[in-house]
Image (cartoon, grey):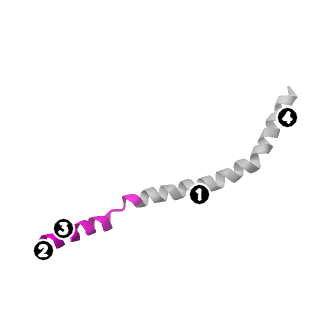
Amino acid sequence: MLSLARLVKTLAGKVIRDDRGANLIEYGLVATLIALVVMPAVIILGPLVAALYTGVIGAF
């Protein structure tokens, strides 16, 4: 019984100290933030850039 308690305590300590998943969550949050900034910028600036290229092509 004592060895089972020691095993549970050891495993619980490893799980509590394991922070590898935190980095993955942080990268996910950064990617989400970038997507939330880039998508509206593309939606807003897309027609303006297309009009600019159409104007340049029409000049030739």
Q: Who is closer to the viewer here, 55 or 29? A: 29
Counting from the top left corner in percent of width and height, residue 46 is at 75, 44
Residue type marked 2 = Leu
- Residue sitting at x 60%, y 53%: 34
Q: Who is closer to the viewer here, 16 or 7? A: 7
> Does label 4 or label 1 sit earlier along the sequence?
1
Counting from the top left corner in percent of width and height, residue 6 is at 17, 71
Chain part drawn in magenta: 1-21
Give the residue at the far front of this rendering.
1
Label 1: few (<14), some (14–19) or many (≥20) C-alpha neighbours in 10 Å? few
- Residue sitting at x 18%, y 67%: 7
Q: Which mark is residue 55?
A: 4
* Residue 57 figure quarter: top right
Secondary structure category for the residue under label 4? helix
State left or right for residue 2 relative to residue 25.
Answer: left
Residue type marked 3 = Leu
> Does label 1 or label 2 sit earlier along the sequence?
2
Residue type marked 4 = Gly
Q: Residue under label 3, please give it.
A: 7
Label 3: few (<14), some (14–19) or many (≥20) C-alpha neighbours in 10 Å? few
Secondary structure category for the residue under label 1? helix
Q: Of tags 2 and 4, which is closer to the observer?
A: 2
Residue type marked 1 = Leu
